[in-house]
Image: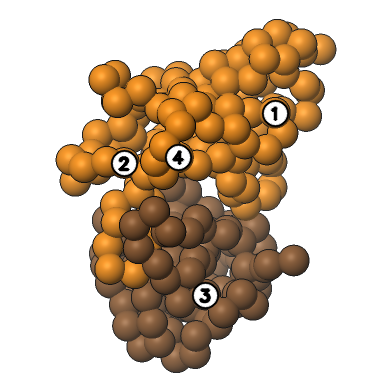
Chain colours: A orange, B brown
Amino acid sequence: AQSVTQPDIHITVSEGASLELRCNYSYGATPYLFWYVQSPGQGLQLLLKYFSGDTLVQGIKGFEAEFKRSQSSFNLRKPSVHWSDAAEYFCAVAAIWGGGNKLTFGTGTQLKVEL
Amino acid sequence: DVKVTQSSRYLVKRTGEKVFLECVQDMDHENMFWYRQDPGLGLRLIYFSYDVKMKEKGDIPEGYSVSREKKERFSLILESASTNQTSMYLCASSLKSQGAGANVLTFGAGSRLTVL
């Protein structure tokens, strides 16, 4: 069965600093990987996804993630964090079944941005 | 704009009550999902459905059931609510597809259930 590990429960960065959120996955085949963000009181919004091809994927809000098969990782990065990026971030891996994606999520990383 | 609507944002129920959580999507999606979200545990899949009247167990189905009588509506049922079912419940939907064309999940805003 697939699994996702997000080793950092909480991360605090200063506004304008760079950000990297770690994600490691376990899956027996080529993974489909996702990053979602959840702002307080909101549902989850897709930031970006990796299906195949270029291992560096661009998402919304200036985020990017790099798929590294050798390290089973899919880390999320942003060069300069804004105060509005404070939220909880979830990495997910998809198990492909007959009808589409069944996502397994990590436990999340709570991002705090200091002004 | 595509939308997944969960009818109740906040519910408070008593132990032993039957609880219905409703989810409606207006995107004509075939797949629908129910997750629960708990601090430190992330999102865990309860049940999902890939067609009307079809359902599949997720990772934590115990204590829950679901109903999908219409394509746009997916209900989560707690037959006899217990305090350990106090949680945030998230509904999601997606198109039916496979492989590289697989589509992503669109989530509702969530229903926070407290069982006393």
Mark 2 is surrounded, within 10 Å at the Cα level, by few (under 14), some (14 to 19) or many (20 or more) other residues, namely: many
State how far apart marks 4 and 1 are (Cα). Answer: 16 Å
Residue at the farthest bottom position: B69
Q: Where is residue A66? Give x, y as percent.
A: 46, 24
Q: Residue at x 62, y 36 (%)?
A: A59
Residue carrying label 2: A31
Q: Are marks 3 and 4 on the same chain?
A: no
| Mark pair 2, 4: CA separation | 8 Å
Q: Which residue is mark 3?
A: B29
Say if mark 2 contacts mark 3, CB within 8 Å: no
Q: Are marks 1 and 3 in contact (CB under 8 Å)?
A: no
Disc 1 marks which residue? A62
Please give the name of the residue rendered at 38% of the width and 82% of the height, measured from the top-left corner: B51
Nearer-N-terminus badge (1/2): 2
Closer to us: B77 or A99: A99
The number of callouts visible is: 4
Q: Residue at x 76, y 11 (%)?
A: A16
Q: Which quarter of the picture shows residue B59?
A: bottom left
Question: Are circles 2 and 4 on residues that touch, CB within 8 Å?
Answer: yes
Question: Height in image: A11 above or below A88?
Answer: above
User: Which residue type does callout 1 highlight?
Assistant: Gly
